Amino acid sequence: MAILKIARMGHPVLKTRAKPVANPTAPEIRKLINDMRETMADAGGVGLAAPQVHVPLRLVIFEVPAAALDEGDEDDSEFFSQVLINPKVEPRSDELESGWEGCLSVPELRGAVPRYTHVHYEGSDENGTLIERDAQGFHARVVQHECDHLDGILYPMRMSDLTSLHYISEMRFNSTEDPSNETS
Ligand code: NI
């Protein structure tokens, strides 16, 4: 395994539409996933898309509360790592909610981003198994953020009000509202 270099906003790989993965179970894809997991853990993120490590393929990894995978209570403290290859995401309703986001490719910043509250997503995992799921709340937000990376979209491009684009070090929060762990 290896820790990969993360591309930052402005790098061309983050602006282009990533290509489908031809064979999700190929050894080089498994190696990429392992390296991305190590890179994400090292950087302290909750999600990472292949273009962020200079690989223009449609592959993302993210961590969601384990219970969310069973469409249960998302307050569960156990986190589960999900691989999604060639994903498709569709909103389940028109409802949008604003929430804080960060991105490993946009370091030291946070911004409030409107996202669909309910989405349906599908894709393949690293074993070639079809993953198909409804997601809401934080789970839905992470999936939308990561899959946007595959289409060359970074979260500031989704913001409706840029006044909330902040350096973390300048933010003053209520103790109940800490966005510092939502980096992907
Ligand atoms: Ni990101």
Image (cartoon, rainbow, N blue to C red):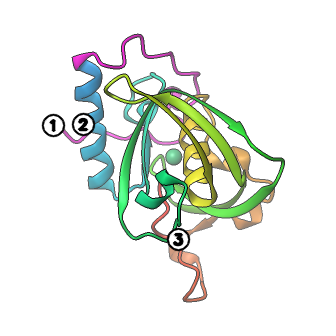
Disc 3 marks a residue whose amino acid type is Ile
Task: Say whether residue 14 is magenta.
Answer: yes
Name the residue tied to disc 2. 35
Looking at the image, is mark 2 or mark 3 nearer the viewer?
Answer: 2
Disc 1 marks a residue whose amino acid type is Met
- What main secondary structure does the magenta stretch of the protein show? loop
Name the residue tied to disc 1. 1
Q: Does ligand 1 reach within 8 Å of label 2's beta carbon?
A: no
Residue extending furthest toward the right: 94
Disc 2 marks a residue whose amino acid type is Asp
Task: Say whether residue 45 is magenta.
Answer: no
Q: Position of residue 89 (x, y in %)?
A: 64, 34
Q: Does ligand 1 reach within 8 Å of label 1's beta carbon?
A: no
Do residues under tags 1 and 2 come within 8 Å of each other at their CB atoms?
yes
Do residues under tags 1 and 3 come within 8 Å of each other at their CB atoms?
no
The mark that comes first in sequence, 2 or 3, is: 2
Q: Which residues are magenta?
A: 1-27
